[in-house]
């Protein structure tokens, strides 16, 4: 739902972990997924600020690890994602870039039992950069597009999805090209689905990279920021309609808002949850 800048900045400052997102979602009466989307944004921006500094200190991090500190302990002290700390350590150990990526994601095969165990723990604890997190982000994207496709069918709109479009080298195409669609009094020629929360900075990024090109090439359109947005981005461009989860109804909407984030299974892990979500795609 649209948030005022004050509401957004309050959430941004309050939420520093998935556990806090669950707690404050209940207090603020918002879907848990909205707060976790804001947390996701917050973590990524923090990583951009601190990545190169920590990368330059990877030998120091490796010395700490060899002295007995775990990957997760090193990450928590620096408030940095543990999978990325693991990658720094693996690089400092002399593994190739390809091997670093493989080990950090698969958490096995290093030849060191302690290291493999800690890589697995880093995967479990990482909200954004773990293999599970990447899979869930893909699932969120798929569900968002599926809901929009169903919505377009119900409205009787004629559309072509991006995977059916004829690709021209270098051409930017939205998720759906649409004809015969009017929403809230506006003609909509295309629809883009974004499984994110959009503040002003995020929206400007998407405008520059994609949305402005769609408007130029196809005419007025619509972007769905599934997890909400800051209300100051409304009305900035008269040819762009901005919506979120509150505009839609669908059997899988609850799964998109909450089920695709960090709900743990009975064993405390995430993989079982992901597999069950995939099994329930017929809902």
Image: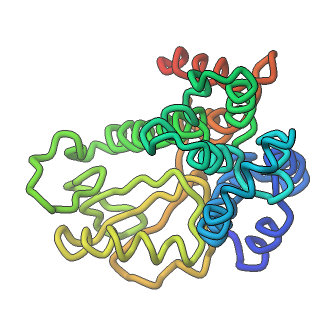
Q: Nearer the viewer, residue 190 or 20?
A: 20
Residue drawn at (61%, 76%) of the image: 231
Quarter of the image with the N terminus in it: bottom right
Q: Position of residue 114 (x, y in %)?
A: 75, 25
Q: Position of residue 155 (x, y in %)?
A: 34, 45
Q: Is 27 on the left-hand or right-hand side of 235?
A: right
Determine the image quadrant of residue 266: top right
Q: Is 170 on the left-hand or right-hand side of 257?
A: left
Q: Position of residue 226 (x, y in %)?
A: 55, 53
Looking at the picture, the colour scheme in use is: rainbow
Q: Is residue 223 above or below residue 263?
A: below
Q: Residue 152: tell me if it is visible.
A: yes
Q: Nearer the viewer, residue 171 or 217?
A: 171
- Residue lying furthest bottom in this view? 236
Q: Nearer the viewer, residue 144 or 67?
A: 67
Determine the image quadrant of residue 228: bottom right
Residue drawn at (61%, 61%) of the image: 55
Q: Position of residue 79 (x, y in %)?
A: 80, 58
Q: Nearer the viewer, residue 83 or 143?
A: 83
Q: Is residue 52 above or below residue 112?
A: below
Q: Residue 2: tell me if it is visible.
A: no
């Amino acid at each position: 739902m649209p948030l005022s800048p004050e509401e957004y900045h309050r959430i941004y400052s309050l939420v520093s972990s998935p556990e806090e997102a669950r707690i404050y979602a209940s207090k603020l009466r918002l879907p848990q997924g909205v707060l976790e989307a804001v947390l996701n944004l917050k973590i990524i921006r923090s990583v951009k600020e601190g990545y190169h500094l920590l990368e330059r200190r990877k030998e120091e991090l490796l010395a700490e690890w060899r002295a007995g500190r775990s990957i997760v302990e090193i990450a928590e002290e620096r408030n940095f994602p543990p999978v990325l700390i693991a990658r720094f350590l693996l690089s400092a150990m002399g593994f190739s870039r390809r091997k670093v990526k493989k080990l950090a994601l698969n958490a096995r095969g290093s030849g060191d039992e302690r290291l493999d165990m800690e890589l697995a723990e880093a995967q479990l604890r990482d909200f954004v950069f773990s293999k599970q997190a990447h899979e869930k982000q893909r699932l969120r994207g798929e569900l968002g597009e599926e809901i929009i496709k169903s919505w377009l069918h119900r409205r009787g709109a004629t559309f072509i999805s991006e995977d059916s479009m004829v690709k021209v080298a270098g051409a930017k195409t939205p998720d759906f090209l649409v004809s015969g669609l009017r929403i809230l009094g506006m003609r909509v020629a295309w629809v883009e689905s974004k499984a994110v929360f959009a503040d002003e900075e995020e929206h400007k990024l998407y405008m520059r990279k994609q949305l402005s090109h769609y408007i130029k090439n196809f005419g007025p359109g619509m972007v769905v920021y599934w997890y909400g947005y800051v209300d100051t981005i409304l009305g900035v461009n008269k040819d762009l309609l901005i919506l979120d989860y509150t505009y839609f109804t669908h059997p899988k909407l609850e799964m998109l808002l909450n089920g695709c984030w960090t709900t743990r299974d009975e064993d405390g892990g995430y993989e079982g949850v992901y597999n069950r979500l995939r099994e329930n795609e017929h809902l």
